[in-house]
Image: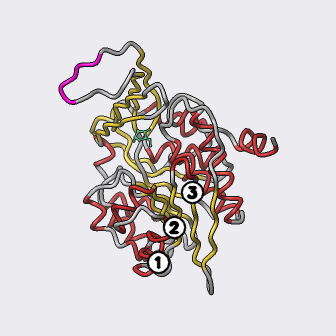
């Protein structure tokens, strides 16, 4: 089984700030780093570093060559990337001293996905392959329709959460990875068990992972005759930069699923990888290798 990640790629401009800028405030900052990012690219790097075979789909715009190179250096197949005549997507990221971030996302090239591209990008996929999606590209609903018709297993991380998601048929998904805020938007409650009940009533075949910040994460997997549940605590670390931690979690989780790991193994590796990532600056550059994750698990 292979993984196709049809997603975004961004150039992240990361500013270290004493605090997030307030309405009306001009804030002078001295530290700027530009690095690879985008939820799609970050998750592909995470899946590849976790040992999976990954294809990156999506649009490559002007200035995005270094993102393609990084994907290739990490073993991600870029042959499905679609060149477009538009500036590469980017993000303006403020990182506060406690490692928290605040992100402005400009879609640029990522918003150039077309119907023809969807058909060609999905063409090499066969039944049972895993399609991984986030919400930083356009035509998500169309991609899901076509992937469902081909019998792909579909995992959606609906981030950033916006009104476009109203077009998506969540009943066609196999996996949903959300944080507690997104659970609240979708179901009206941030309580994970209650959110799960609402989602399970609406979409009986959908398995769900809800990340809960310092309270860890919880998984609900629909099996033939029961629902398997796993509660995963966080591994406590000193955070430097939380950017991309959710992507690291999602990528490691998806790679574990494809490897055939148990749900508990998927959750534990995802949580450990995310914990390591927040101890390092940057998004894609902070994703650990599988060897690093397994070494920490033994401690
Ligand atoms: O999830 C983190 C990512 O969100 C960053 O890399 C940035 O590009 C934004 O898309």
Q: Are marks 2 and 3 in contact (CB under 8 Å)?
A: no
| In the displayed structure image, the side of residue 161 where residue 95 appears, left or right | right
| Callout 2 secondary element | strand
Q: Residues within 10 Å of mark 1 (few under 14, many from 20)?
A: some
Q: Earlier in the sequence, mark 1 or mark 2?
A: 1
Number of the front mark, 2 or 3: 3
Q: Is residue 25 magenta?
A: yes
Residue that lies at the very extreme toward the right in this rendered image: 298
State the extent of the magenta-drawn residues as a range. Answer: 23-27
Q: At 50% from the left edge and 62% from the top edge, which residue is drawn?
A: 131
Q: At 38% from the left edge and 65% from the top edge, which residue is drawn?
A: 189
Circle 1 is placed at which residue position?
A: 200
Q: Position of residue 160 (x, y in %)?
A: 36, 50
Q: Is residue 194 magenta?
A: no
Q: Earlier in the sequence, mark 2 or mark 3?
A: 2
Q: Is 207 in front, or is 115? A: 207
Q: At 36% from the left edge and 35% from the top edge, which residue is drawn?
A: 102
Residue that lies at the very extreme toward the bottom in this rendered image: 225
Q: Quadrant of the C terminus?
A: top right
Q: Quadrant holding ligand 1?
A: top left
Circle 3 is placed at which residue position?
A: 217
Using the numbered discs, state the Cα–Cα distance from disc 2 to disc 3 in whole angstroms: 11 Å
Circle 2 is placed at which residue position?
A: 208
Q: At 37% from the left edge and 65% from the top edge, which residue is drawn?
A: 143
Residue 94, by quadrant, is: top left
Q: Is the shortest distance between ligand 1 and the CB of mark 3 under 8 Å?
A: no
42 in relation to 35, above or below: below
Q: Position of residue 175 (x, y in %)?
A: 51, 67
| Callout 3 secondary element | strand
Dominant secondary-structure state across the stretch colored magenta: loop
Q: Are marks 1 and 2 in contact (CB under 8 Å)?
A: yes
Using the numbered discs, state the Cα–Cα distance from disc 1 to disc 2 in whole angstroms: 9 Å
């Amino acid at each position: 089984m292979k993984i196709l990640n049809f997603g975004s790629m961004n150039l992240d401009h990361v500013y270290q700030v004493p605090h997030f800028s307030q309405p009306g405030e001009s804030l002078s900052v001295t530290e700027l780093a530009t690095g690879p990012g985008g939820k799609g690219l970050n998750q592909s790097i995470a899946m590849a570093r976790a040992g999976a075979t990954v294809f990156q789909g999506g649009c490559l715009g002007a200035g995005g060559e270094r993102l393609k190179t990084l994907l290739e250096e990490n073993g991600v197949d870029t042959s499905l990337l679609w060149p477009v005549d538009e500036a590469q997507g980017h993000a303006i990221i403020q990182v506060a001293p406690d490692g928290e971030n605040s992100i402005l996302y400009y879609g640029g090239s990522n918003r150039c996905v077309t119907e023809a591209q969807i058909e060609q990008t999905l063409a090499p996929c066969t039944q049972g392959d895993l399609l991984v999606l986030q919400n930083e590209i356009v035509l998500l609903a169309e991609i899901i329709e076509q992937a469902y018709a081909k019998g792909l297993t579909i995992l959606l991380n609906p981030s950033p959460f916006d009104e476009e998601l109203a077009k998506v048929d969540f009943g066609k998904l196999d996996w949903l990875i959300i944080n507690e805020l997104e659970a609240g938007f979708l179901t009206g409650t941030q309580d994970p068990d209650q959110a799960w009940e609402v989602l399970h009533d609406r979409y009986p075949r959908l398995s769900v992972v809800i990340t809960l910040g310092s309270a860890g994460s919880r998984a609900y997997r629909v099996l033939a005759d029961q629902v398997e549940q796993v509660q995963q605590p966080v591994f406590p670390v000193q955070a430097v930069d939380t950017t991309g931690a959710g992507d690291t979690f999602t990528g490691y989780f998806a790679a574990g699923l494809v490897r055939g790991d148990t749900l508990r193994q998927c959750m534990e590796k995802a949580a450990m990888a995310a914990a390591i990532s927040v101890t390092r600056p940057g998004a894609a550059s902070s994703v650990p290798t599988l060897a690093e994750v397994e070494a920490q698990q033994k401690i």
